[in-house]
Image (cartoon, grey):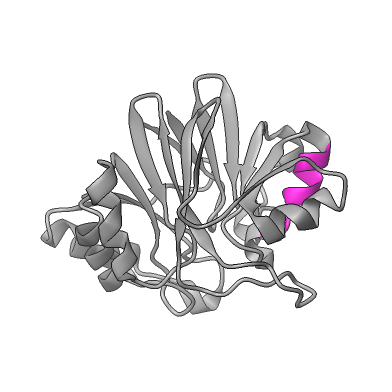
């Protein structure tokens, strides 16, 4: 499993020969100006919620690649009405895709499209594929629902928002890693805007002091599980 960070909460996940994009917000992110969305491969696009900083490039990429959009019922319906292919889910549900099992889990946040229309309820994803399991929390506050995750699966990596203000900050993300019983964390949703700028060294130190590993990838950088 190869994971590439495209800035903000945008990720590329490659499982065998399947390419998955998560929350593609690239053309609107000045920090990601070196990423060309025309070059991105996508068989599936996972969308955690409908805010513009998570969906901006969904339509353009899906039209070019024919990717299946996977999200809550409302978001998928929105894109199906644009003649794009989608697979609707809702909280607690799971489905066996060709890349592995995908579960849509709770997140505490809001969700509306840029025009203010209803974007369903926000969520996160658990991907079990190729003998590795990852948790993509999406935009969320710290929530006790996270404690349910290790009751059902053992995580190899958690992808958590750490920028604070709109989501969890560093301290709550450390608590979240305790709740989900996963000490290996990839940070996201930081530095894109002034509200969510963080001190990288302090963030890593706080995780390290708790016996945990916080990884902050450069935009375009990849890691493998």
Expressed as whole percent of the image width and height from the top left, the position of residue 147 reads 25, 60
56 sits to left or right of 70: right
Q: Is residue 225 visible?
A: no
Q: Pick the residue in front: 25 or 77.
A: 77
Q: Verify whether residue 62 appears in magenta.
A: yes
Q: Which quadrant does the C terminus fall into?
A: top left
Quarter-of-image position of residue 37 = top right
Count of numbered badges drawn on the protein: 0
Q: Verify whether residue 6 appears in magenta.
A: no
Residue at (60% x, 41% y) in the render: 21
Expressed as whole percent of the image width and height from the top left, the position of residue 137 reads 43, 57
124 sits to left or right of 52: left
- In this view, the residue farthest toward the top is 17
Residue at (34% x, 62% y) in the render: 200
Expressed as whole percent of the image width and height from the top left, the position of residue 76 reads 71, 52
Instruction: Judge whether 156 appears above or below 48 on screen.
Output: above
110 sits to left or right of 30: left
169 sits to left or right of 188: left
Q: Which quadrant does the N terminus fall into?
A: top left
Residue at (66% x, 56% y) in the render: 73
Magenta stretch, main secondary structure, is: helix
Q: Pick the residue in front: 141 or 214.
A: 141
Quarter-of-image position of residue 178 = bottom left
Q: Can residue 67 be seen in this view?
A: yes
Instruction: Judge whether 60 appears above or below 199 on screen.
Output: above
Residue at (72% x, 35% y) in the render: 67
Find the magenta span and give its range.
55-63
Expressed as whole percent of the image width and height from the top left, the position of residue 96 reads 51, 32
């Amino acid at each position: 499993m190869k994971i590439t960070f495209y800035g903000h909460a945008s990720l590329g996940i490659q499982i065998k020969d399947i390419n998955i994009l998560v929350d593609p917000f690239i053309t609107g992110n000045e920090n990601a100006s070196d990423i060309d969305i025309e070059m991105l491969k996508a068989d599936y696009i996972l969308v955690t919620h409908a805010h513009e900083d998570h969906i901006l490039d969904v339509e353009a990429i899906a039209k070019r690649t024919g990717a299946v959009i996977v999200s809550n019922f409302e978001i998928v319906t929105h894109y199906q009405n644009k003649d794009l292919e989608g697979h609707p889910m809702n909280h607690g549900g799971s489905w066996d895709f060709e890349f592995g099992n995908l579960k849509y889990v709770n997140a505490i946040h809001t969700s509306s499209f840029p025009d203010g229309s209803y974007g369903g309820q926000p969520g996160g994803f658990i991907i079990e594929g190729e003998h590795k399991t990852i948790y993509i929390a999406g935009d969320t506050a710290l929530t006790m629902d996270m404690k349910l995750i290790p009751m059902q699966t053992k995580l190899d990596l958690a992808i958590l928002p750490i920028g604070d203000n709109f989501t969890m900050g560093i301290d709550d993300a450390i608590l979240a890693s305790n709740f989900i019983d996963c000490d290996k964390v990839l940070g996201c949703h930081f530095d894109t805007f002034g509200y969510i700028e963080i001190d990288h060294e302090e963030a890593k130190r706080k995780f390290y002091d708790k016996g945990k590993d916080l990884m902050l990838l450069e935009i375009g950088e990849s890691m493998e599980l």
